[in-house]
């Protein structure tokens, strides 16, 4: 579809103003802004090692902005440095999840706020009070003994129930199939990574409207980490083979209608690589408009941000106007 789009007083309009506007761009594509749905601003920051938490988060957010990202979600952090950025109009719009929540010794040292099993529902509400939007739970982790679940299914269910009752949303880091299944049964809002995802999980996620954020870009680094961790061979093969099939699972989830979002897991690597995650969607056989939407309009809708929408007022001809041509495969 090709149509004219006008900007009046900084707002989009689709009805031509009274006077003749200037055309500043023609025969191109108009997008509602790129989104990184999974980025940890405190980690792998361009800021110096001795920078404060806020300075580290700010430098990472700026790197994202320089890459064209206008909105991002930080599903968990080792600190609360990102809180100061929530209302900064010079940076991307940001939603955070407070600190990672994990049992003692069940995440990378120093990253999570460690809480006992029975305290998870209460502590999830504490992090929701900090973030105002999200909570992030570390669902499983590995040692040399292998991957194991961090929480009982009933604990996850109660945490999700409490967060939802308080008006928040809850995400989970999940690698193992039983943890993915527990998160689905608990009605988590998004499952991050979901490495050993099965077809029955995909069907259940569609039925419960649970989002899937595969973070395909980190597969090589995560695979190398697992190989060096001394995990038992059978379990290491299970996860490694899941990485090989990840593109197939993403394509299957998209075809099934699961809300599938592009996230880079920046923090495992540099910030500002959202284009590479979009490329992974394309390599998985996902249609171009869907792949781009996973890092644009689909992600913005999931996060509750506006798309390219008509100005909600009468268009006046008393101010400057810019005319822009819009041509895009799909914007919703």
Image (spheres, helix red, strand yellow):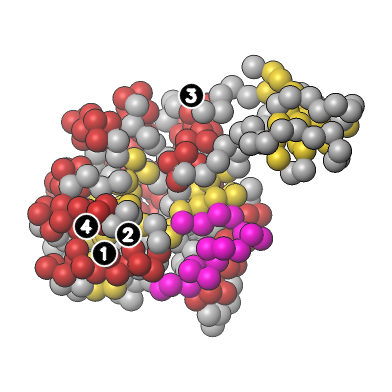
CB atoms at circles 1 and 2 under 8 Å apart? yes
Give the structural element (helix, strand or loop) at label 3.
Answer: loop
Is label 4 or label 1 in front?
4
Please report whichever mark, 1 or 3, sits nearer to the chain's N-terminal start: 1
Q: Secondary structure at mark 1?
A: helix
Residue 148 sits in quarter: bottom left
For marks 4 and 2, the one nearer the N-term is: 2
Q: Is residue 89 magenta?
A: yes
Q: CA distance from mark 1 to mark 3?
A: 37 Å
Earlier sequence position, callout 3 versus callout 4: 4
Q: Secondary structure at mark 2?
A: strand
**Which residues are drawn in magenta?**
79-95
For disc 4, the neighbor class at 10 Å (few under 14, some 14 to 19, many from 20) is: some
Is 313 rendered above or below residue 228? above
Residue 201 horizontal/vertical position (percent): 21, 35
Side of 121 relative to 309 (left or right): left
Note whether 283 is above or below 115 in the view shown: above
Q: Residue at x 89, y 28 (%)?
A: 19
Q: What is the x, y in percent for residue 125? A: 27, 65
| Labelled disc at residue 287 | 3
Q: Nearer the viewer, residue 136 or 56?
A: 136
Per the image, the residue denoted by label 1 is 124
Point 60% across, 63% down: residue: 88
Q: Could you classify mark 2 by the number of other residues whose Cα lies within 10 Å: few (under 14), some (14-19), or many (20 or more)?
A: many
Q: Residues within 10 Å of mark 1 (few under 14, many from 20)?
A: many
* Position of residue 165 measured from the top left corner of the image (x, y, whole percent): 25, 54
Q: Which residue is mark 2?
A: 135
* Residue topped by disc 4: 162
Q: Residue furthest top?
A: 1
Please state if 83 lies on the left or on the right of 64 as rendered.
left
First along the sequence among labels 4 and 1: 1
Q: CA distance from mark 4 to mark 1?
A: 8 Å
């Amino acid at each position: 579809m090709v149509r004219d789009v006008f900007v009046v007083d900084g707002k989009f309009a689709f009805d031509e103003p009274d006077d003749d506007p200037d055309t500043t761009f023609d025969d191109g594509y108009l997008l509602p802004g790129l989104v990184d749905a999974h980025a940890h601003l405190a980690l792998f920051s361009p800021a110096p090692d001795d920078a404060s938490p806020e300075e580290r988060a700010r430098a990472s957010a700026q790197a994202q902005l320089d890459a064209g990202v206008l909105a991002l979600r930080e599903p968990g952090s080792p600190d609360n440095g990102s809180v100061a950025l929530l209302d900064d109009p010079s940076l991307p719009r940001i939603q955070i999840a407070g600190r990672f929540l994990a049992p003692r010794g069940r995440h990378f040292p120093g990253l999570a706020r460690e809480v006992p099993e029975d305290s998870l529902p209460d502590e999830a509400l504490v992090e929701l009070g900090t973030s105002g939007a999200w909570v992030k739970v570390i669902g499983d982790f590995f040692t040399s003994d292998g991957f194991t679940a961090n929480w009982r299914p009933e604990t996850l269910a109660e945490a999700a129930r409490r967060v939802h009752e308080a008006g928040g949303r809850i995400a989970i880091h999940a690698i193992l199939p039983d943890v993915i299944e527990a998160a689905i049964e608990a009605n988590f809002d998004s499952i991050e990574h979901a490495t050993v995802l099965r077809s029955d999980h995909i069907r259940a996620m569609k039925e419960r409207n649970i989002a899937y954020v595969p973070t395909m870009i980190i597969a090589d680094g995560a695979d190398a980490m697992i190989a060096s961790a001394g995990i038992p061979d059978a379990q290491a093969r299970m996860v490694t083979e899941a990485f090989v099939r990840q593109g197939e699972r993403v394509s299957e989830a998209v075809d099934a209608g699961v809300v599938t979002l592009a996230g880079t897991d920046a923090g495992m690597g540099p910030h500002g690589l959202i284009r590479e995650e979009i490329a992974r969607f394309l390599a998985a056989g996902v249609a171009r408009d869907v792949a781009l939407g996973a890092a644009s309009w689909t992600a913005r809708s999931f996060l509750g941000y506006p798309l390219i929408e008509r100005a909600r007022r009468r268009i006046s001809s008393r101010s400057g106007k810019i005319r822009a041509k819009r041509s895009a495969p799909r914007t919703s």
